[in-house]
Image (tube, grey):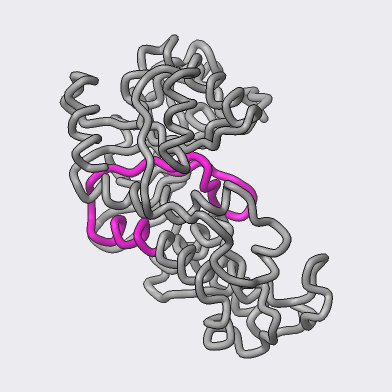
Amino acid sequence: LLAAAASLARRAANGDKELIFMATGSDANSLSVTNNSLVTLATLGLRRHVMLLADGWQTCEVLRAVLYGPCFWSSRMLRRQPADSITLRKFWDFRFRFYYIKKKYMALLVEGGYAVLQADTDTVWMHDPFRMLRLMRDASLVIMRDVGIANAGVVYARPGSMSALRLLDEVAWRVQLLQNHPEIVARIVPFARPPYYANSDDQSLLNDAIVSAVLRNRTFLGSTARYEGRNKYNPAGPDWASQPEAQAHKEQLRAMWKLQKRSSVVCPWAGAVGPSSRASYVRLPIRGGDAVALAPRSLFAHLPYSAGN
């Protein structure tokens, strides 16, 4: 994959070694939304930056015929459900097959010197995001903001501190750990009982990894412990709100947000998104003088977009 990235970066003729990393399956809906995203990137001259990861060589054959352009696959892709957990029983589909491999290869690409924008295929691009990202030099991780903290569907990372690289690798590690070894939950969550929920969704795991990096203390409370409490899919679990871990999680979030710093960046397309030429965003400091930036809405946002929404 790193050799493919080097080849793609040369083709893109970009000294910043910027890549857009996307993953897709071969079903009709996946192909449709992927094509829509690629078309919007092409209008911005960014199609040549795209590394498209598929779930196997057969899918690559389909993609090359339908979408045109390079396609990559990995023999490390999960072919079948790796273990028995409530999460995988209820939600196992092609998304869960990609969670680990996307985050692991993103970390490897950044370690290899590339600036990587990992994006879900259901994205629409109105502006070249690299124009703003290049200006946000006070953070090597820039992530779409969402309820809670961040959205794992749009994550940008460039070479920076070891702390930032460890954060990326931590997310991949957590995904594969909980997918392959749900029994480990018993060692992490004192009140958990089998069958374990063993949440392996990359977004909640990313958020706990961010909290861990900012507070410099590894936590599994928001992504693992809370899902072992009672919920729609785990009715036998104890009441989460009554657990001491729930209070500890609230305290961790308060402590993290107290450390936030405000920054702003020139918005290269300010006239198109609002009256201001600058966009404000939050930085969450991590070791090495680095930070995780929560992207301004003029950069990454849910649709429908409006400047005041």
Q: Is residue 158 magenta?
A: yes
Q: Is residue 29 visible?
A: yes
Residue 206 in the image: state x and y as whole percent: 49, 58
Residue 29 in the image: state x and y as whole percent: 65, 29
Q: Could you say which is closer to the camera, residue 242 or residue 255? A: 242
The magenta stretch is 143-170
Residue 129 in the image: state x and y as whole percent: 40, 25
Q: Is residue 300 left or right of residue 306?
A: left
| Image quarter hosting the C terminus | top right
Q: Is residue 246 left or right of residue 214?
A: right
Q: Is residue 101 magenta?
A: no
Residue drawn at x 70%, y 80% is 195
Quarter occupied by residue 56: top left
Q: Is residue 277 left or right of residue 16?
A: right
Q: Could you say which is closer to the camera, residue 52 or residue 127? A: 52
Residue drawn at x 50%, y 18% is 66
Q: Is residue 280 visible?
A: no
Q: Is residue 181 above or below residue 281?
A: below
Q: Is residue 291 above or below residue 198?
A: above
| Image quarter hosting the N terminus | top left
Q: Is residue 5 above or below residue 286?
A: above
Residue 169 in the image: state x and y as whole percent: 35, 60
Q: Could you say which is closer to the camera, residue 232 or residue 83? A: 83
Give the total number of marks visible in the rendering.
Answer: 0
Q: Could you say which is closer to the camera, residue 188 or residue 175? A: 175
Residue drawn at x 58%, y 58% is 201
